[in-house]
Amino acid sequence: MQIHHTIASLRAARAIAGKVAFVPTMGNLHEGHITLMREAGEKADCVIVSIFVNRLQFGAGEDFDHYPRTLAADCEMLAAAGVKHVFAPDETELYPQPQRYHVDPAPAQVSILEGEFRPGHFRGVATVVLKLLNIVQPDYALFGKKDYQQLMVLSNMVRELALPVEVLAGDTVRADDGLALSSRNGYLSAAERARAPLLHQLLCRIRDAVRAGDHDLLKLETDALDALAAAGWQPDYIAVRRRADLQPPVHMDDALVVLAAAKLGQTRLIDNLEI
Ligand code: PAF
């Protein structure tokens, strides 16, 4: 496995790599990422992974400075998963000057859910992902469904800007107790980690109720928010939305997803379930 720190070196390797599947990450990899790498390996001759903690997508007071940077351990996992190339630029390589050109996703898609609580987040994500796609020029790009809104924003960006890449979605990988794997789980204390599966349990409860014909979404959402608050969480949202555009459903036969974000102690967790 080769580790590239410059755009020039990555491009030279990509030029002779055949069909490429690309998985952008911010590192601190876990089994969820590695599952994406394996899926990528099934699609293409060569898997390229980027590891870059992207300042543009963090808001003031978020965890950019403390985001875990674990390049050596990440590279060991990637080599074992059969990844051929890692692109790990430092900030001066990717942003040699402050970024002045940005991708502004459609406001209707980024003023809701995560976008409401993390203004500017998806602009930062879309900008770095467009830049990474331009550098890597992959045939496929893989993103996890755990970041459901991110997947939607990036799929739309690729379609609306006619980028020559196919976006593939990877299912969320969960711990045995249901907690969605996330780099941010590492912030939880042992006591918080034991309480963390509640978020997934409440999403399952809503999914099962809707599937069983309960269409009182407001009550289902409010009950779950109350349950989180009663258990000492600070919920941001729990919402049943249309999968296609994450807007509130008009018809209950729309394909739906329930999404949630809540803080447990200092750690903000997100999760979702397709219904
Ligand atoms: O999902 C992530 O880890 C990041 O948002 C991404 C897509 C790598 C862009 O920085």
Image: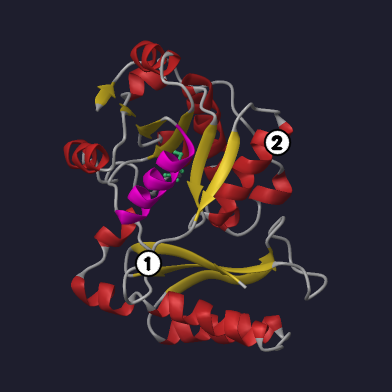
Main SS, magenta residues: helix
Residue 86, image x and y in percent?
31, 29
- Residue at point 42% right, 18% down? 14
Residue 9, image x and y in percent?
34, 13
Q: Does the magenta stretch include residue 238?
A: no
Disc number placed over residue 22 in the picture, else none: none
Residue 205, image x and y in percent?
53, 85
Q: Name the residue under label 1.
A: 174
Picture quarter containing residue 241?
A: bottom right
- Residue at point 37% right, 34% down? 49
Q: Is mark 2 on a helix, strand or loop?
A: helix
Specify the amino acid type for callout 1: Arg
Q: Is residue 132 above or below residue 68?
A: above
Q: Is residue 222 visible?
A: no
- Residue at point 68% right, 59% down? 246
Is the distance from the Cβ of mark 2 to the nearest ligand 1 atom less than 8 Å?
A: no
Q: What element carries label 1?
A: loop
Of the 4 image quadrants, the one containing the C terminus is bottom right
Q: Name the residue under label 2.
A: 159
| Magenta-drawn segment | 31-44
Q: In this view, does 121 lie above or below 6?
A: below
Of the 4 image quadrants, the one containing the N terminus is top left
Specify the amino acid type for callout 2: Arg
- Residue at point 36% right, 55% down? 32
Picture quarter containing residue 239?
A: bottom right
In-front residue for pair 179/139: 139
Q: Does the magenta stretch include residue 36?
A: yes
In-front residue for pair 79/225: 79
Q: In which quarter of the image is ligand 1?
A: top left
Residue 229, image x and y in percent?
45, 82
